[in-house]
Amino acid sequence: MARKKNDVYAVVGVGRFGLAVAQTLLELGKDVIAIDINPQRLRPLEDTPADVYVVEEISQEAFIDAGLGSCRCIIIGVGKDIEASILAALNAKELGAERVICKVINADHAKILKKIGVEVIFPELDTGRRLAMRLSSNVTEDIFTLSSDFSIIQVKVPACYEGKTVVEADFRKKYGLNIIASVVDGKVDGQIGPQTVIKGGQFLVVAGRNDGLEKMQDDFDRLSDREA
């Protein structure tokens, strides 16, 4: 039976970035196709459910032979070869993938890819931003950067919110943010509704623009300092 596009992700170029993406997708139960011109880079995936392909070149023919036409999302992790990266992204777009995400190394590289509708990611920049936001706040547990102006964070809620519902807390009005999950004792609950009651000191997973997240962090830090 042919796999549906929603079920299949491809990683093109399995360096440190590509390998981390592939392994995480596998841990999440996703079907993964991984291709690279260097067989050594694919070795860590050989004993996993991933479909692994060594190719002679990063070309559309190689993509088709590896089954990338069945992929909803193709992640390009090609390293410092900008020409190969752009060509890989073009080939992925022409295969009809709904999303093509490409690792980039500079602003010009990103600008070219955005012109053809490719999502870009700066791994080093994103890692630095995550670390800075965590270090600058006493209440932020983790952050996942989705773009230059939108992120998801896991934040500890000040005790003064204890007993309030999501509607009463009104993070959307105050900060333009949405609560998408809660974390209690390491267990994630994604069933968040308007009448969900917040527990003081619990962690909430909140999504929104970075300016709203930063304002919320500042407010939560001040409230937590007062309660300490």
Image: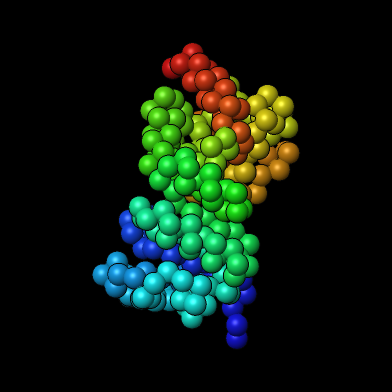
The reply to whether residue 91 is visible in this rendering is yes
Q: How many marks?
A: 0
Rendering coords of residue 26 (x, y %): 44, 66
In the depicted structure, whether residue 16 falls above or below residue 192: below
In the picture as drawn, the residue positioned furthest to the left comes out as 40
In the depicted structure, whether residue 23 falls above or below residue 216: below
In the depicted structure, whether residue 178 falls above or below residue 36: above
The reply to whether residue 203 is visible in this rendering is no
Quick check: 90 left or right of 138? right
Residue at 62%, 36% in the rendered image: 208
In the depicted structure, whether residue 167 falls above or below residue 228: below
Residue at 47%, 40% in the rendered image: 107
Colouring: rainbow
Q: Quadrant of residue 96?
A: bottom right
Q: Nearer the viewer, residue 26 or 95?
A: 95
- Assign the N terminus to one quadrant of the image: bottom right
Q: Nearer the viewer, residue 228 or 148?
A: 148
- Assign the C terminus to one quadrant of the image: top left
Rendering coords of residue 5 (x, y %): 61, 71
Q: Nearer the viewer, residue 214 or 38?
A: 38
Residue at 41%, 53% in the rendered image: 82
Residue at 38%, 42% in the rendered image: 124
